[in-house]
Amino acid sequence: MIDVTKFDSLFELMEAFPNEETCYNYLEKLCWSDGVVSPFDEASKVYNLGNHRFMCKNTQRIFNIKTGTIFSSTKLPLRKWFIAIWLILSNKKGISSLQLARDLGVTQKTAWYILQRIRFCLAYKDKMQLEGEVECDETFIGGKNKNRHESKKVKNSQGRACIDKTPVLGMLQREGDVIGKVMENTSKQQITPNILKHIKPDTTLYTDEWAGYNDVAKMYPHYSVDHGRGQYVNGIAHTNTIEGFWTLLKRGYIGIYHYMSPKHLQKYVDEFTFRYNTRKISDRNRFNLLLCNTNHRLTYQELIAA
């Protein structure tokens, strides 16, 4: 059998985890490397009941490694969860719920729920701050009005109008990480708080000429390029790196998902930012990183709530 710590492909993953027992053992070793911890009381003593079941002494509640994670309250085997996680993280453009349903042998509804639960765990760097040199730019998700049928065209939706499109603000540290945030519009009232939250003071900002950056231009060292006049590079000032990230997001939108609802758009953005921010590590390490961050559980009722 393959070394369980050295799988680097989907085939090797399935060889490493041929049954549920191996999945439980691996997850326990990975998440409880310093000893079993109760999800109900971290300071409590824990009793081993056998068969991967444990009891919290202080609360008298029984739990296992899946309790309180995305794996809990589902009938889906851990082995299929592992395959789903591998597929969504190793495919640069993502994987559709229809394709995942075929690969796992489940319904499309179940596959969609699995994908959304996994995406909910991908915002693991939400509180980080960028520094050094940071490029900021916005993009719009929702399709072009000129490509719609005449009966479906939306009036007054040209340019930066957000009637039929959803704006996303991207902040990318050169040679570093990217943060993407869905916004209501591209006004400075939306842009400024996001930049102040996610970018450290004294960071050099590079943006385009959009007026939404006027306030932050007074708070940070700031350089811009005028895209409206065909200027894309002005010395060290450009937004080409964040534009490259938007290309990855748009390729996933056009080629895989075809539609990203405004309600769930932030989860899709988190999916692409996670893959970008872990681009320098192996698929195996990316897989392990997510397994250690699966305690952000999203219930189905929360997912479909208005």
Image: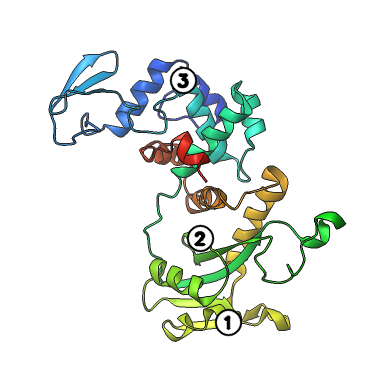
Q: Amino acid at mark 1?
A: Ala
Find disc 3 in the rendering and name its residue: 75
Front position in the image: 234 or 221 = 221
| Above or below for 61 versus 271 | above
Q: Residue 15's x, y, as percent?
A: 50, 20
Mark 2–mark 1 Cα distance, whole angstroms, equals 18 Å
Which residue reaches farthest right? 150
User: How many residues crowd mark 3 within 10 Å: few (<14), some (14–19), many (20+)?
Assistant: few
Find disc 2 in the rendering and name its residue: 181
The answer, for residue 117, to whether it is visible in the render is yes
Q: Are marks 2 and 1 in contact (CB under 8 Å)?
A: no
User: How many residues crowd mark 1 within 10 Å: few (<14), some (14–19), many (20+)?
Assistant: few
Q: Residue 296's x, y, as percent?
A: 38, 41
Chain-order first, disc 1 or disc 3: 3
Mark 1–mark 3 Cα distance, whole angstroms, equals 51 Å
Q: Quadrant of residue 27?
A: top left
Considering the numbered disc 3 on the image, is that residue within a helix, a strand or a loop?
loop
Q: Residue 157's x, y, as percent?
A: 73, 67
Relative horizontal placement of residue 168, taking residue 199 as reference (left or right) = right
User: How many residues crowd mark 2 within 10 Å: few (<14), some (14–19), many (20+)?
Assistant: some
Relative horizontal placement of residue 39, taking residue 291 as reference (left or right) = left
Considering the numbered disc 2 on the image, is that residue within a helix, a strand or a loop?
strand
Find disc 1 in the rendering and name its residue: 211
Q: Amino acid at mark 2?
A: Lys
